[in-house]
Amino acid sequence: MQDENVTFRQDSIDNVFSQGAKPFFVKSPSNLSKYTVTFLCLLLFIFASLYFIKLPIHIKAIGEVLAGKDYHQIVINEDNQVVTNVAILEGEQVIQGQVLLQLDSRDKVLTRTELLVLNLQIQELQEQLNKVANHYRESAGNISKQRAEHNRVVKQLENELIAENAILARYKENVANGLTAATLEDTQKRFVSQAQGRLIKEKSVFTALDLAQLEINDNYKRQKDTALAEIARLTVKKDQISKGLQVLSPCNCVVDNVFIENGIPVVPGQSILTLSQARDSSTLMLYVPASQYRKIDEGSNIKVNVASYPSNKYGALKATVIKVSASPVPGNMIRKKGQGLHDATYFIVKATIDNVPDNVTLVTGMAVDSDIVIDETSLFDLLFDLDNKN
């Protein structure tokens, strides 16, 4: 079968051995075929470009930086206090629970009056506690007496039931032998049933007594615990007033600043000391809205923008994910740990900051409010969203 695009040339047979002779004449492809090939090449180039062009995958996040140091500010909330003994110096290392300074009341007359009032309050509570204990013992004793009385009643009824059952057994035997009328057996059965009913009724009293005992136990414990807790609180306050108020270190820290001296009065809300506690590394606490969340694996690298960090010079801050919460947490439960959290739910992401420039200082509390770059995807996948379709 001859191809219509190929034509046999007769003159080439005559000159088959002549130079340049061509036994066939091949027609050039049509313009339509050229356009088709060009379009297919262009389409292939576009698809290849869509596949190889990578775009970042980012999610919204807010949070804060926990930098190389945690700072603690010691504030006095007590009124009418004066510094009597500053026990530390700036730059000194202190341990948790160490006494930092001592405060005493400025008004000695007022101090004596407060101690007198506290002693009276403690005495009243102790008397109240004794009354509660006496009432408990009296109530428990009454229940014990009632239980003993009902034990005797129940024992007597049990004996009566045994006797009535013995009579019933004889009646049954006599009826079987024809010695007694059946009506007597029926009458005795009623007596036995009545004895059983009285016994059940009296035994139910034990349940009521048990419930009453539980109730007075609960009331006594509640009143006792309340009184003891108040006595303990007043005792601590009494010791503070009589011995002075001691300010203790909340951590193993370094004393950065001391703002007071011996003999200086302080007012409520006044900052008297600042302490700092070193961290092993700077970290990020990030809160990702559940609606924005995409899977973040532990150990993966992320990029994040931090307030006051010169990202225009050094690029986005890089961090390594340490931990991701297994499920979202309501914003009202973590409101104190981050800024700008609403009533939505958030995944909590903890990450370690990598490679902070030497001349850049990160400070605890720096805000994070940006997109986090967690991965890259091709433009092809982004447009056709193959993962979601599968």
Image: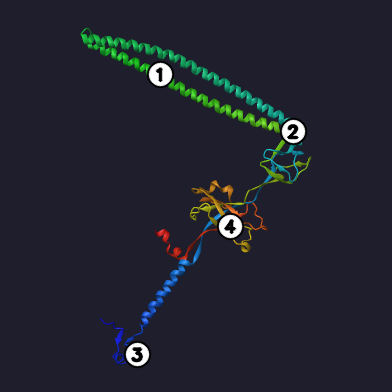
Tell me the residue that label 1 is attached to. Answer: 203
Q: Which mark is residue 110?
A: 2
Q: Which dot, 1 or 3, sits closer to the camera?
A: 3
Q: Residue furthest left?
A: 178
Which SS class for mark 2? helix
As shown in the figure, which amino acid type bears the numbered disc 2? Leu
Q: Secondary structure at mark 4?
A: strand
For the residues bearing labels 2 and 4, Cβ distance under 8 angstroms: no
**Where does residue 13 sit, x and y in percent of width and height?**
29, 90
Q: Which residue is mark 3?
A: 21
Total tally of numbered discs in the picture: 4
* Residue type for callout 3: Ala
Name the amino acid, label 1.
Lys
The residue positioned 67% from the left and 32% from the top of the image is 236
Task: Report the residue at 58% width, 28% height from top.
Answer: 225
Is tag 2's residue or tag 4's residue first in the polypeptide sequence?
2
For the C terminus, the quadrant is bottom left
Quadrant containing the N terminus is bottom left
Q: How is the image coloured?
A: rainbow
* Quarter assignment of residue 191: top left
Q: Is residue 321 above or below residue 37?
A: above
Secondary structure at numbered mark 3:
loop
Q: Nearer the viewer, residue 252 or 146?
A: 252
Mark pair 2, 3: CA separation:
130 Å
Point out the frontmost of discs 1 and 2: 1
- The alpha-carbon separation of the residues under discs 1 and 3 comes to 130 Å
Q: Position of residue 91 (x, y in %)?
A: 74, 46
Mark 4 or mark 3, whichever is nearer to me: 3
**Image location of residue 359, percent across then percent down:** 68, 58
Sequence order check: which comes first, mark 4 or mark 3?
3
Image-based side of 199 in relation to 334, left or right: left
Residue assigned mark 4: 318
